[in-house]
Image: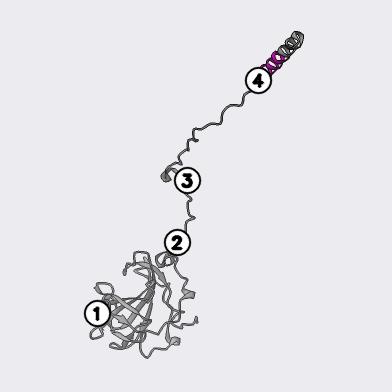
Amino acid sequence: MPDRPARRWGVWAGAAAFAAGVLWVLSTPTPEPAATTPPVAVPAPPSSTLPRATPAPTPAAPTLQAQAQAPAPASKLAALQLPVQGVLAQDLRDTFADGRDNNQRGHEAIDIHAPRGTPVLAVDDGPIAKLFVSKPGGITIYQFDATGQLAYYYAHLDAYAVGLKEGQAIRRGSVIGYVGSSGNANPDAPHLHFAIFQLGPEKQWWKGTPLNPFAALGGKPP
C-alpha cells in the first residue's frame, strides 16, 4: 500500500501545475481574428466628370481677305502692260495728283491720249468684274487682277471689244476696248482714263484705295 504523504505530494504538484497553466492562458493576449469581409471598392468618377486636357489652339493661317486689307504702295506694284496700243512709256505723263472740278477732287488716274479707235489692252491677267456706263466715265471696264486684290479701271472708251462680257477671264495684252471720249471727256481729246485701286475685303468693284499707276506702266519722272 503506497505511502500517504507521497500521494498528497503528487496531488499538490498536479494542482499547482494546473493552476500555473490557467494563469498563463489568462495572461496571454488573444489576437483579433482576421477580417473575412472583402474590402469595399471605391467607384471611379464617371468619365464626364474627369478633367479633360484642352488642346492648344492652332493659329489660323492668314486669309487672302485679311492680306488684302493693307494697300500696297504704288512703288510695289508689278510692272503692267501699257494699256494703249502704240503708246510708249516715255510718252506718259503723271496726272495722278492733278485736281479736277476746280480742285474739289483729285484725278487719281492717268490720262493716255491716242486717236479715237486705238485698241485698249488689258494691263494684266484677270477677270472682267464689271462693264458699266456712267455719266462721268462713259463706257467703262472694271477688271480685277488674278489675286482679287487690285481693280483696273478703263474709262471714256469709244466701244468694248466684240464679245467682251462680265466674268470673262482676260489675258494680259488682250484687246478689251477702244479709245474714245465718252462720258465727261472732251470730244476733241480722245484718251484713256486709267486707274488702279486696292480692293477692300468686300471686293466692291466701284470702291477702293487709289494707287498711282504711272511707275507700274514704266513712266519716268521728268
CA separation in Å, label 2 and label 1: 37 Å
Q: Residues within 10 Å of mark 1 (few under 14, many from 20)?
A: some
Q: Amino acid at mark 2?
A: Ala
Give 78 or 7, whichever is nearer the viewer. Answer: 7
Indicate the secondary structure of the residue bearing disc 1. loop
Judged left or right of residue 180, residue 19 is: right
Question: What residue does disc 2 label?
Answer: 60
Magenta range: 13-29
Indicate the secondary structure of the residue bearing disc 2. loop
Q: Which mark is residue 51?
A: 3
Q: Amino acid at mark 4?
A: Val
Name the front one of labels 4 and 1: 4
Q: Residue furthest front?
A: 1
Judged left or right of residue 54, residue 144 is: left
Q: Amino acid at mark 1?
A: Lys
Circle nearer the N terminus (3, 4):
4
The x and y percentages for residue 119 are: 31, 88
Question: What residue does disc 4 label?
Answer: 25
Q: How many marks?
A: 4
Q: Is residue 6 visible?
A: yes
Q: Is residue 186 visible?
A: no
Circle nearer the N terminus (3, 2):
3
Give 85 or 28, whichever is nearer the viewer. Answer: 28
Does 197 appear above or below 52?
below
Residues tagged 1 and 3 counted as in contact (Cβ below 8 A) = no
Question: What residue does disc 1 label?
Answer: 165
> Is residue 213 in the magenta section?
no
> Is residue 20 in the magenta section?
yes
Circle nearer the N terminus (4, 1):
4
